[in-house]
Amino acid sequence: MRRDPMKLKVGLSTCPNDTFAFHGLLTGTTPRFGLEFEFVLQDIQQLNESLARGDLAIGKASFFQALSLTREFGVLPVGAALGFGVGPLLIAREPGPRPDARARLLAPGAGTTANALLRLLLPEVRDVRHVPFAAIMPALARGEADGGVVIHEGRFTYQALGLHCRVDLGAEYERTQRAPLPLGGLLARRDLGADVHARFTAALRASLAAARSDRDATFATMQRHAQELSPSAIWQHVELYVNDWTTALGTRGAESLLRFEQALRGAGLAARDLPPLELLCE
């Protein structure tokens, strides 16, 4: 008797690195390894919340959020945003020193790795308001806060709004931890089982390989979901966040997750009574 393919609800961000990697699966042009997908595209904090509610079988999450979901989810070895020089920036309307305890700052969501780094590296700052990441730079340009943490394409577009970098949080983390920064990755429900984990990993790797072999074919998909970005900003985003660790986290990637987890648990920013992050499939 013919079995219907398993259908999974999968969440990814609207950012070009994710839509680049998922292009083949989104368009049905690469193999799905016996799986079917219902895709949900959301802002990273929305994805964090969707995973926490149990709405997704597989989804992109900030690694900070992942630390609170380790009972139900593991980390897939594909699709991660991890590296050097990729971290969030604390920016402001005017140049100046690091913010002090009186500063009013904006951050892109309580579960984001950007928020984790802000709390880890600037623990004295208490007045932090969370807004969607796309709203942070316009709010700073209007003078509505003393500073804000930008992620994604904000790293290379903030200067166009006349804004200034006060602290490179990613670079500071890299110096103190002597490791690449794990920003976010794909989580999968543990109860899907090893076979589904392996088939999904193979499917996304096939999609990613196809995207790399024909980059131009992915542009319409990326542009459709990142309409406010110029072509040059879209490609800068891909160059910055899609690397070898996106294809396979490997030993170095797994070590970076452990270092990140230890730093946050040690600082009291993540619960110590939960299981550690576990890399699935490999």
Image (tube, rainbow, N blue to C red):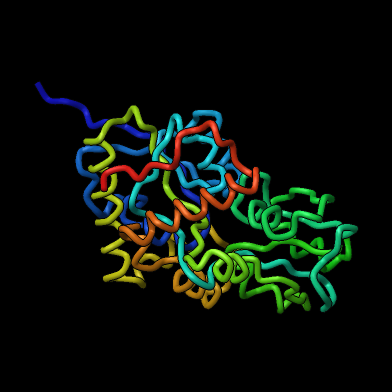
The location of residue 230, given as percent across then percent down, is 57, 73
Q: Please name the residue shown 83% across and 72% down the image.
A: 93
Toward the top, the furthest residue is 1
Q: Is residue 39 visible?
A: no
Height in image: 74 above or below 12?
above
Height in image: 117 above or below 196?
below
Q: Is residue 19 visible?
A: yes
Is 42 positioned to the left or the right of 119 in the image?
left
Camera-nearest residue between 77 and 29: 77
The location of residue 257, given as percent across then percent down, is 45, 53
Camera-nearest residue between 267 and 38: 267
Q: Please name the residue shown 75% across and 69% down the image.
A: 91
The location of residue 261, given as percent across then percent down, is 51, 48
Q: Please name the residue shown 74% across and 48% down the image.
A: 130
Is 126 positioned to the left or the right of 68 in the image?
right
Camera-nearest residue between 193 and 131: 193
The location of residue 258, given as percent across then percent down, is 45, 51
